[in-house]
Amino acid sequence: DPSSHLFHLGSAASILDAGIPAMPKITGVVAREIFDSRGNPTVEVDVLTELGIFRAAVPSGVSTGVFEALELRDCDGSRCMGKGVLKAVENINTTLRSSLIGCDVMDQSGIDRMMVETLDGSQNEWAWSKAKLGANAILAMSMAVCRAGAAGSDLELYEYIAKLAGKSTDNFVMPVPLFNMINGGSLVGNRLVCQEFMILPVGASSFREAMNIGSEIYHTLKGVIKKRYGQDACNVGDEGGFAPCVQDNDEALDVLMEAIRNSGHESKVKIGTDVAASEFYDEATKKYDLDFKNPQGSSSDMKKSSSELVGYYMAWLAKYPLVSIEDPFDQDDLEAYGQMMAKVGSSAQIV
């Protein structure tokens, strides 16, 4: 009964000691189904220790690769379009809970190995696949345990993760935030092939300034899109970027550059893109279809070989302040990645 589990969580949380136990143990686990920002079900879990309740929720992408761990969906067409995660939730509330109660939350690697290799144990040709219990169940538990371990170590979460990774915990650098500006690909209904065009305010002197720059460019971009294409073009995709009826990647980049210039931040901003090229790669022809969303079908000149696509990206790098390209080729097109790296060198990051 979930209500009784919550009662025990609340009761235990109410009798916390003022000090930090030397080895905080897991005393309770409760998982539930929630909805993510796209309105799809996902897994949330609370892990209880003597220090309190530690919560984590699992993200899920739209364009996923074959090498990724396997999340567990209910595949029950009568609810949530088959995307429910009640099985994964049940696996947490039964198998994982009974096995992890009493475990030291600061034994992150031991708990992760137990969940992946012992309690789940499923493998495919690449790695431990997490198909039995669900990667969404295992990841939710792992993240919540990590938060509990950070509290048990009296460290911020980022400090604790650095400690687990064997990195320095006395010299941190704030990351540069990437702002999703224009959406295409499988995320939205326009003809734009690239999944995301982003800005990177690498010249900002602080995280606060970077956020201000991102906000100002985002709203400036809305004005540019409205002026060019009309109010209807200011719709946004499910990840927050604008989704104008742009037909060409270069056109999208030109629109973004106009917004950057108009905002007055051109000297402090670079551009990044997530191509998600596996979404428009044809394994049979070994071609990349840059007009794959055209309902009339794409012309032959829009279907590029790997080497032609390398040249396509190199033209971008010469024309735009582009410093980051994510998934520019299919996940198995390793030769293309090699060609790209040889040409790009250290001038841009290939993710």
Image (cartoon, rainbow, N blue to C red):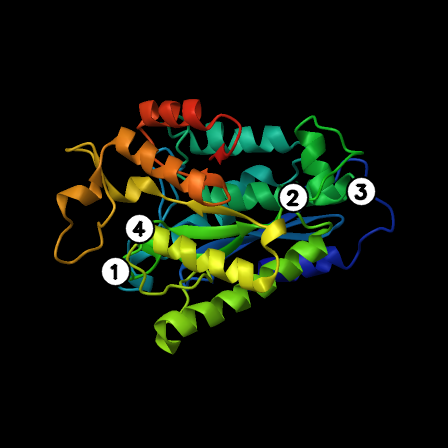
- Look at mark 1 in the image and give the residue it sits on: 77
| Circle 2: element type | loop
Please report the residue visible at 87 percent of the width from the left and 51 percent of the height from the top.
18
Q: Earlier in the sequence, mark 4 or mark 1?
A: 1
Mark 2 to mark 3: distance in Å? 23 Å
| Circle 3: element type | loop
Q: Residues within 10 Å of mark 3 (few under 14, many from 20)?
A: few
Q: Earlier in the sequence, mark 2 or mark 3?
A: 3
Mark 3 vs mark 4: in front = 4
* CB contact under 8 Å: marks 4 and 1: no
Whether residue 226 is visible to the viewer of this picture, yes or no, is yes
Q: Earlier in the sequence, mark 3 or mark 4?
A: 3
Mark 4 vs mark 1: in front = 4
- The numbered disc on residue 175 is 2
The amino acid pointed to by label 1 is Gly
The amino acid pointed to by label 4 is Val
Mark 2 to mark 4: distance in Å? 28 Å
**Place of residue 96 in the rendered image (x, y in percent of width and height, measured from the top left):** 52, 41
- The numbered disc on residue 161 is none
Mark 3 to mark 4: distance in Å? 46 Å
The quarter holding residue 342 reads: top left
Q: Earlier in the sequence, mark 2 or mark 4?
A: 2
The amino acid pointed to by label 2 is Pro
Q: Residues within 10 Å of mark 4 (few under 14, many from 20)?
A: many
Mark 3 vs mark 1: in front = 3
- Look at mark 4 in the image and give the residue it sits on: 193
